[in-house]
Amino acid sequence: MEEWKQLLGDTITSPEELAQKLSLDKEIITTVHQKYPLRINPYYLSLIKDVNDPIWRQAVPDAMELDDTGFVDPLAEEDHSPVPNLTHRYPDRVLFYVTSQCAMYCRFCTRKRKVGYTCQSSTHDIASGLQYIREHPEIRDVVLSGGDPLIMEDDKIEYLLSKLREISHIQIIRIGTRIPVTLPQRITEKLCSVLKKYHPLYINCHFNHPREISEESTRACAMLAEAGIPLGNQSVLLKGVNDSPVIMKELVQKLLAIRVKPYYLYQMDLVSGADHFRTDVSAGLSIIKMLRGHTSGLAVPHYVVDTPKGGGKVALIPEPIVAYNDDSILLKNYEGDVYSYPTTLGQLTPVDMA
Ligand SMILES: *Cc1c(COP(=O)(O)O)cnc(C)c1O
Ligand code: SF4
């Protein structure tokens, strides 16, 4: 049996087993588990060093999940679903949820109301998603999401990618996955040989903390990069996990070193059962402020708020414009110094240049 299947087979999914393993209160875990699924595989579990450390917080159920804020479907993904399992929010690209399974169930997950419940997206839902994409020539970019698309068997992944590649208006395919972080053993030579047949293919992974960059995840990212796949990263800003400029700086620098480009840093959505992870917006702005100019521009992600009710993503930047009129714009740089730049064309005189 392949190693990753063995690891998944040895995964903890019962409250009793987890409570025993980590010496936790079985009743609390059981109550949380009645609301939200539980899955921690031995690899991710091995990254935990201490009670409540940043790895633990992402994986181990907590009583705070029972505080119900009443938020459901924060992004109104279902209001923008023309067919089941597909969201068409932007003009030229769609999100296609191809499975509801993951290698681990993250406690902060935006889709925690949905992931982990049905066995897999039914063949019917995949077919109706494909049909919708075929019938909409304006779609040039398909983002495969879930759940975690790479939890699927190689042949299922190959089937999906080949069907998408048959559609001539599809320029790029993207896969959003946490597998390189939560179960890097899943990235096999066989999987890479499937993926690389369907270029241009992009993968966005989801590292949240520098301690998730292990020998195994480094190897997984190297294999994907060697298969010619550009790698990006989407992190979620999480209280008690990565809401500090020092930790985020270490994370983004280490990501570049394993050939992964930081793409988005998400402000937490309004997720029922995960509100204890939410930070003030100022936490995200300070992180960007401490990155921009202080380290490689390549390392700086876009800090985005996915606006409630399906308004889409909006990028936030710490205000660099000090003043702005018809003549000039005054800009503050990363050291806090202010510089002037002409606002419109044709006003430069040799005096200005002096
Ligand atoms: C995030 C998202 C996308 C992809 O957005 P990009 O900014 O192009 O990465 C597409 N559709 C939906 C509904 C999304 O939430
Ligand atoms: S892997 Fe992604 S979809 Fe799955 S539980 Fe974690 S955050 Fe949610």
Image: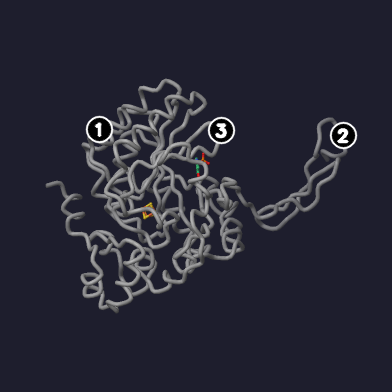
CA distance separating discs 2 and 3: 43 Å
Contact? badges 1 and 3 (CB < 8 Å) = no
Along the viewing direction, whichever of 145 and 225 lies nearer the viewer = 145
Along the viewing direction, whichever of 59 and 215 lies nearer the viewer = 59
Q: Residue at x 52, y 60 (%)?
A: 270
Q: Position of residue 117 (x, y in %)?
A: 31, 54
Q: Which residue is mark 2?
A: 349
> Which amino acid type is marked by label 2?
Thr
Mark 2 is surrounded, within 10 Å at the Cα level, by few (under 14), some (14 to 19) or many (20 or more) other residues, namely: few
In the rendered view, does 37 fall on the left or right side of 232? Answer: left
Give residue 214's quadrant in the image. bottom left
Q: Position of residue 147 (x, y in %)?
A: 35, 48
Give residue 153's quadrant in the image. top left
Q: Residue at x 47, y 56 (%)?
A: 236
At mark 1, the secondary structure is helix
Mark linked to residue 193: 1
Ligand 1 has an atom within 8 Å of the beta carbon of the residue at disc 3: no
Mark linked to residue 91: 3
> Which amino acid type is marked by label 3?
Pro
Which is closer to the viewer, label 1 or label 3? 3
Q: Position of residue 283 (x, y in %)?
A: 57, 63
In the displayed structure, 63 sits above or below 312; it is: below
Say which label, 1 or 3, has the lower sequence index. 3
At mark 2, the secondary structure is loop
Q: Residue at x 52, y 57 (%)?
A: 269
Residue lying furthest left: 1
In the rendered view, does 284 fall on the left or right side of 165? Answer: right
Give residue 194's quadrant in the image. top left
CA distance separating discs 2 and 1: 59 Å
> Which amino acid type is marked by label 1?
Ser
